[in-house]
Image: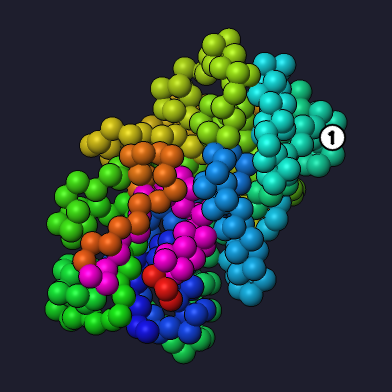
Amino acid sequence: MRVIVVGAGVLGTLHAWHAVERGHEVLHIEREAEARGASVRNFGQIWVSGRAGGEELATALRARELWEHIGARVPGIGFRAIGSLTVVRNEIERAVAEAATRLPDAGARGYQLLDADATRALNPALRGEFAGALWCERDAAVEPRVAQLALKNALLESGRYTYLGDREVRDVVGERAVRDDCGETHHGDAVILCTGAWLGGLVRELIPDLPVRRVRLQMMQTDPLGEPLTTSVADADSFRYYPAYRSDALDALNAGQAQAPTAAEHKMQLLMVQRADGGLTIGDTHEYETPFAFDTVEEPYEHLTGVVESILGRTLPRVRHRWAGVYAQCTDTGRVVHRQQVRDGVWLVTGPGGRGMTCSPAIAETTANELGW
């Protein structure tokens, strides 16, 4: 079988990976020279801890298993089974973490409630003032800026993979074929459109009422910390954002402890991961109303700096990168992904939202299974 994959972000790349793994030939088409969107502008977190139960958690756990397997074969993706700590400052936040440990699937997530001393023992870089943390053993990380390139190089070694960069697909031509902006038509046995947040143009023509929206965020990265940050780190605002933490304790938190004004205005949480070079990737904000601003604003960065410094108990290293990114999210945020056959032999797969880096291997595997590859 010859599979055409359009879009070389993490979702498209993992579709290509599964097709090659199953013995098929892949033509991979990307409108940029290399992926430049949300797949390289994220934390690189394989984030199991906050996922909703049921399908979403099952997908994340299967993806976590696949990422570890892929990481063993392709070390360049930088897979690290580091877990995460969601730091709590007081009893009302701690109660939400404790409620999470009582979930029926808490064991599958690797949840454990730690006091302050146990938190610092697990991650000695955390020297600030806090009451403890929710530990999630199943969380992990990869290096988002290089993972797609490392996977592409591994795919090229198979001899069954061809990459075409700087080619924008403009048309679906009849059945199982696409035409690019160089006028070349590519024929296959299946076409998978993984266009990410690119929802206009061809995608709008194929599905005018696509139930997917775009979300914008701001993030930053620092100079090296100078010491290991042995886990990912989140703050208690992430309890408000991720569905796994819904509980009476969360209702009490929302009623009794308001977010900081900047965090509330920009729909923020703290997520923090150390990169391979020692720098920290820190974020993020959420903007849902279009048209999006074209500039970044400084107040969220100031808020995040204050939160991080309170947890680390030290001054944050110099911020060397600030950026904004846009990802695609199903308008029904409980859906893991939007997968739709748009023509005979042509499927669109998009909208995983902030879970794209986490869940892409399992989403792609499901596509391959459903299509009978």
Whether residue 9 is visible here, answered yes or no, is yes
**Farthest bottom residue?**
159
Q: Is residue 174 left or right of residue 262?
A: left
Residue 301 among those drawn in magenta = no
Question: Residue 44 location, x and y as percent?
Answer: 55, 53
Quadrant of the rendering where the C terminus is positioned: bottom left
Of 95 and 261, the residue lying toward us: 95
Q: Residue at x 53, y 33 (%)?
A: 243
The percent position of residue 74, horizontal first and vertical second, equals 61, 73
Q: Is residue 231 visible?
A: no
Residue 37 at x, y percent in the picture: 37, 55
Q: Residue at x 72, y 32 (%)?
A: 101
Q: Secondary structure at mark 1?
A: helix
Q: Is residue 354 magenta?
A: yes
Location of residue 8 with respect to 80 vertically, above or below: below
Look at label 1 and name its amino acid: Ala
99, 41: nearer the viewer: 99
Q: Residues within 10 Å of mark 1 (few under 14, many from 20)?
A: few
In this view, 132 is above or below 50: above
Q: List x then y, in percent, for residue 26.
A: 38, 80
Q: Quadrant of residue 324?
A: top left
The boundaries of the magenta stretch are 344-370
Above or below 35: residue 137:
above
Foreground pick, 13 / 21: 21
Q: How many marks?
A: 1
Task: Find disc 1 in the rendering and name its residue.
Answer: 118
Q: Residue at x 65, y 49 (%)?
A: 139
Principal SS element in the magenta part? helix
